[in-house]
């Protein structure tokens, strides 16, 4: 045992390996990505081999070693052979600890690829400049859009140069789709789904002939052209046989036909929206919410009765003054003075002499007395409201949801993910109410700065949800770090409001499958499942622009640049797509700056400087790091 903790260095010397520091769910998924899809040796550095996901990580085949140190120190980095490693992933610990570990690793190995988790994305971008080969990612920022979109009942989207890509299912698929990304979707058996299967109607022979003979095509002796290959370009519309469905856009594979008898027929397709969909909330609803929200200061029914009675008396007295004097301006003036207790009363001598200030006689004096007494009632209430409004910010306490909170989303848990989800929904104009049991949670200050109500306390979920106005909510998003807590919150929410949509953060796939089978109008997402592919791709030098959810499966949208010496040089679209798992959705050639969507030429080979945007599965993106090199060889 060292002064830093228990150390278990690898039994045999190891090199050209990848190091993952962390024992949480994200580390677990990341190790799976590396050993299963990229097939690289992995050494894992954990703080405790008996806690969190460390025992499961240690049992994974392909893990070269699991080393235990309480923190990522110089000694720990030497124990995992940092000097001969190809990459380092820091996915646990605070931002400060990860920054320190990344800089220390670079001192040991200047050429190592470093990917580190950072909640503060702007700080992460600045730290990237200090590293020769590093990338800062936020797991919560990667996963939060999927949770926010699921809460609103619409798909998540990824922005690529002003276009927003999203996943559409079944009847929502339109004829201008980019490509079909999944079939055989069965919500009762998520394991049957096929994500980006091999292309239907193999065009390998046509591609080979086109590449061999060029644009003129193969010419037989005598000048007779051969019959086109079955997978050649489509014939003109006049000669084409009638089809049952719409013709897919140029460059897209044909839409799968009806599923065989007994097979699930659900499909998913990648589509483009011109603008990011926003939640429409008209100004009248916003104004109504603001007006009703002021009622939060009058929580007592007795208080409301007293104030309403006083207000009615003031209005009646104001009407009497106006009737007696027939001067609206003077009536408003004298009524406000009386309400503030600053009116000048009539003197008995003036009344006897007929020189009193009032002109309405006895009934005017009665009205003024009523207004003055009611003013005594209003003054302390107004003072209390002012003190509450001004003092709550200084005390640093978040406000509770008010009576005007309607059609809102309840976010349970203000960790990294919950804070991101609440912030994104608020930015989209959707009312949000947060629930948090830990008064020290880092997200409380962030949502308080945005004016988002927070329900705090350790009471039962039923009571807390009632305070969060569950009856008037549209959705609940449970994103705490514990699956059981999230499931409990979802079930309590559905019990209290059978119509509410529930979105639950679950790590276990079996747990999620039962969840889908049991509840309707529900969705399940896994933060680690959404974020791990992006971390793995970044560790391999690939840029993932975003992730899209196909139920519990993940589709990656990545942008790849063909550099000198890259294995992508010389490959065409057919080489990239035919094995399955990859679809080329856009191309930018080195000589042109415009991104071309659905580029139809499957034979043009990539050259240095070209860029491609692909939709890929985890294994498909991993193949671009391995198979491309073999294709070059």
Image (tube, rainbow, N blue to C red):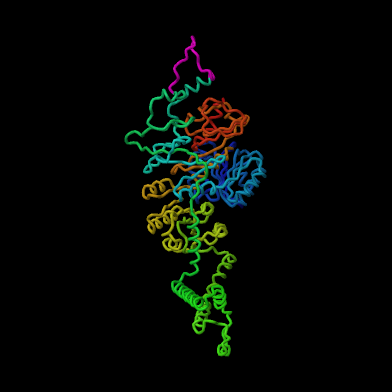
Furthest residue toward top? 222
Where does the magenta region start and end? 212-230
Q: Can residue 43 be spotted in the picture?
A: yes
Q: Is residue 509 above or below residue 376?
A: above
In this view of the protein, which residue sits in the foreground, 438 or 220? 220
Which residue is more in the foreground, 298 or 208? Answer: 298
Percent of width and height locating residue 204: 47, 24
Nearest to the observer: residue 399 or residue 100 = 399
Q: How many marks?
A: 0
Q: Position of residue 253 (x, y in %)?
A: 45, 30
Up the image or down, 166 lies above or below 390; here it is above
- Vertical order, 10 against 233 (above or below): below
- Quadrant that contains the C terminus: top right
Name the chief secondary structure element in magenta: loop
Give coordinates of residue 480: x percent, y percent: 48, 54
Does the stretch in magenta take in 272?
A: no
Whether residue 36 appears in this view of the structure is: no
Q: Position of residue 415 (x, y in %)?
A: 53, 55
């Amino acid at each position: 045992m060292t002064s830093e903790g228990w150390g278990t260095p690898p039994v045999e010397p190891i090199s050209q390996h990848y190091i993952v520091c962390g024992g949480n769910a994200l580390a677990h998924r990341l190790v799976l990505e590396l050993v299963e899809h990229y097939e690289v040796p992995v050494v894992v550095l954990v703080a405790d081999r008996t806690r969190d996901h460390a025992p499961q990580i240690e049992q994974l085949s392909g893990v070269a070693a699991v080393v235990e140190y309480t923190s990522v120190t110089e000694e720990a980095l030497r124990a995992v052979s940092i000097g001969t490693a190809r990459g380092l992933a820091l996915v646990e610990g605070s931002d400060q600890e990860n920054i320190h570990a990344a800089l220390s690793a670079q001192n040991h190995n200047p050429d190592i690829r470093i990917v580190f988790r950072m909640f503060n994305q702007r700080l992460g971008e600045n730290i990237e400049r200090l590293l020769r080969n590093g990338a800062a990612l936020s797991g919560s920022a990667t996963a939060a859009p999927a949770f926010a979109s699921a809460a609103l009942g619409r798909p998540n989207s990824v922005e690529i140069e002003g276009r927003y890509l999203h996943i559409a299912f079944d009847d929502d698929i339109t004829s201008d789709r980019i490509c079909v990304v999944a079939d055989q979707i069965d919500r009762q058996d998520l394991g049957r789904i096929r994500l980006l299967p091999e292309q239907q109607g193999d065009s390998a022979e046509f591609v080979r002939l086109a590449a061999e003979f060029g644009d003129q095509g193969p010419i037989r002796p005598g000048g007779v052209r051969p019959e086109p290959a079955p997978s050649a370009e489509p014939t003109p519309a006049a000669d084409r046989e009638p089809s049952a469905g719409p013709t897919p856009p140029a460059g897209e594979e044909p839409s799968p036909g009806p599923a065989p008898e007994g097979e699930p027929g659900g499909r998913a397709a990648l589509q483009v929206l011109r603008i990011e969909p926003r939640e429409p909330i008209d100004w009248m609803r916003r104004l109504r919410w603001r007006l009703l929200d002021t009622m939060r200061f009058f929580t007592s029914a007795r208080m409301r009765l007293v104030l309403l009675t006083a207000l009615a008396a003031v209005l009646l007295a104001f009407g009497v003054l106006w009737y007696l004097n027939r001067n609206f301006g003077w009536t408003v003036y004298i009524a406000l003075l009386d309400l503030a207790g600053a009116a000048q009363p009539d003197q008995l001598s003036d009344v006897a002499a007929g020189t009193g200030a009032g002109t309405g006689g006895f009934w005017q004096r009665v009205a003024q007395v009523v207004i003055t007494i009611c003013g005594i009632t209003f003054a302390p209430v107004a003072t209390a409201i002012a003190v509450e409004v001004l003092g709550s910010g200084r005390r640093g306490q978040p406000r509770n949801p008010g009576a005007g909170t309607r059609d809102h989303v309840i976010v349970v848990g203000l960790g990294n993910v919950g804070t991101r989800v609440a912030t994104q929904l608020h930015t989209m104009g959707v009312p949000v109410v947060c629930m948090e049991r830990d008064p020290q949670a880092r997200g409380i200050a962030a949502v308080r700065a945005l004016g988002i109500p927070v329900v705090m306390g350790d009471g039962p979920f039923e009571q807390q949800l009632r305070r969060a106005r569950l009856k008037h909510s549209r959705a609940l998003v449970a994103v705490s770090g514990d699956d059981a807590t999230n499931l409990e919150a979802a079930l309590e929410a559905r019990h209290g409001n059978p119509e509410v949509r529930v979105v639950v953060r679950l790590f276990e796939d079996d747990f999620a499958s039962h969840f889908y089978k049991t509840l309707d109008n529900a969705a399940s997402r896994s933060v680690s499942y959404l974020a791990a592919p992006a971390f793995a791709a970044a560790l391999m030098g690939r840029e993932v622009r975003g992730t899209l959810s196909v139920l519990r499966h993940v589709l990656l949208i990545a942008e790849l640049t063909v550099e000198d010496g890259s294995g992508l040089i010389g490959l065409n679209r057919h080489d990239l797509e035919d094995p399955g798992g990859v679809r080329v959705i856009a191309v930018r050639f080195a000589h042109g700056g415009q991104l071309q969507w659905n580029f139809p030429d499957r034979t043009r080979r990539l050259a240095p400087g070209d860029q491609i945007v692909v939709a890929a599965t985890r294994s498909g993106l991993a193949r671009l790091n391995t198979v491309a090199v073999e294709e070059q060889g």
